[in-house]
């Protein structure tokens, strides 16, 4: 079993407020439907990097749908989720009372036991200092040989997403693909790769970045 350390800081407070409201309005189901194809790709790219009987954490897990998906994989020995929104975690526990879901205010939340896979979809750019989280994930979350797999729709090359900070009135870190890759490299990750999945007219696709802790 993995238990969280005490935590003191958070991703941008207004983002937590937005997602808590979405949980109460039932919009988390739309998030699941909208992000599911990208997360399928994310998982499929991560799996070949993982050892047998791997442990996984989904960061910004929402109602836990990806946690439950990963838990059904044959080689998964632990699948847990953490989210800054208590409303989202409450919903996850109502759907899956036996699941492992934690309220954790990031980037300072960390598991007591390291894992093999850290997965996150549509979370990282809400952090005031994404690099701090990436570095902490490398140093404090992952076992040697572990994998980070991050998906995001808001990045510089995806021009449709550039209006989101203003339209949602939220602070977001807006970086290019190469800027993000450099952040992961500086944190110590190797074997970096990226993909843009679901590309179409006026949509550059979900950016997926994977890296390994050696």
Image (cartoon, rainbow, N blue to C red):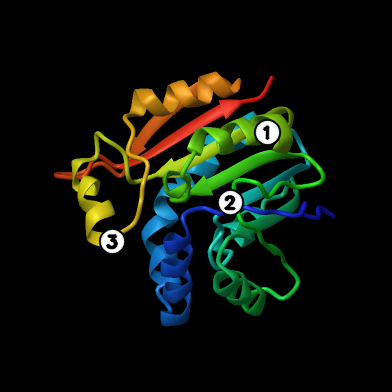
- Quadrant of the rendered structure where residue 115 is? top right
Task: State the residue position of label 1.
Answer: 50
Residue 88 to residue 12: above or below: below
Q: Residues within 10 Å of mark 1 (few under 14, many from 20)?
A: some
In percent of the image, x 35 and y 51: which residue is there?
171
The residue under the point 25% across, 41% down is 199
Which quarter of the figure is the N terminus placed in?
A: bottom right
Q: CA distance from mark 3 to mark 2?
A: 21 Å
Give the x, y percent position of residue 70.
63, 53
Nearer-N-terminus badge (2/1): 1
SS label for mark 3: helix
The spot of residue 167 in percent (x, y) is 22, 59
2 or 1: mark nearer the eye? 2
Tell which residue pokes out farthest to the right in this image: 1
**Helix, strand or loop at disc 2?**
strand
The answer to whether one can see residue 72 in this image is: no
Q: Quarter holding the C terminus?
A: top right
Instruction: Residue lying at the far front in this picture: please name it.
Output: 8
Between 134 and 32, the one lying in front of the other is 134
Q: Which residue is mark 2?
A: 59
Residue 198 image point, x, y percent: 30, 44
- Helix, strand or loop under label 1: loop
Q: CA distance from mark 3 to mark 1?
A: 36 Å
What number of labels is visible?
A: 3
Q: Quadrant of the rendered structure where residue 190 is?
A: top right
Which one is in front, 141 or 209?
Answer: 141
**Around disc 3, counting alpha carbons within 10 Å, would you say few (fewer than 14), some (14 to 19), or many (20 or more)?**
few
- The residue carrying mark 3 is 168
**Horizontal side, residue 109 vs residue 27: left or right:** right
- Residue closer to the observer: 50 or 97: 97
């Amino acid at each position: 079993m993995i238990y969280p350390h005490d935590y003191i800081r958070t991703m941008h407070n207004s983002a937590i407020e937005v997602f808590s409201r979405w949980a109460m309005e039932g919009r988390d189901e739309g998030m699941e439907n909208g992000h599911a194809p990208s997360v399928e790709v994310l998982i499929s790219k991560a799996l070949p990097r993982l050892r047998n009987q791997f442990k996984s954490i989904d960061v910004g897990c929402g109602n836990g749908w990806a946690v439950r998906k990963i838990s059904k994989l044959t080689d998964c020995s632990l699948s847990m989720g953490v989210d800054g929104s208590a409303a989202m975690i409450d919903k996850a526990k109502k759907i899956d009372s036996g699941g492992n879901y934690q309220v954790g205010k990031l980037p300072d939340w960390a598991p007591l036991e390291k894992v093999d896979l850290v997965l996150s979809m549509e979370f990282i750019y809400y952090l005031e200092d994404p690099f701090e989280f990436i570095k902490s994930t490398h140093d404090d979350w992952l076992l040697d040989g572990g994998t980070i797999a991050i998906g995001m729709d808001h990045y510089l090359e995806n021009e449709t997403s550039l209006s989101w900070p203003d339209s949602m009135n939220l602070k977001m870190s807006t970086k290019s693909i190469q800027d993000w890759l450099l952040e992961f490299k500086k944190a110590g990750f190797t074997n970096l790769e990226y993909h843009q999945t679901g590309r179409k007219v006026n949509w550059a696709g979900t950016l997926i970045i994977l890296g390994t802790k050696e």
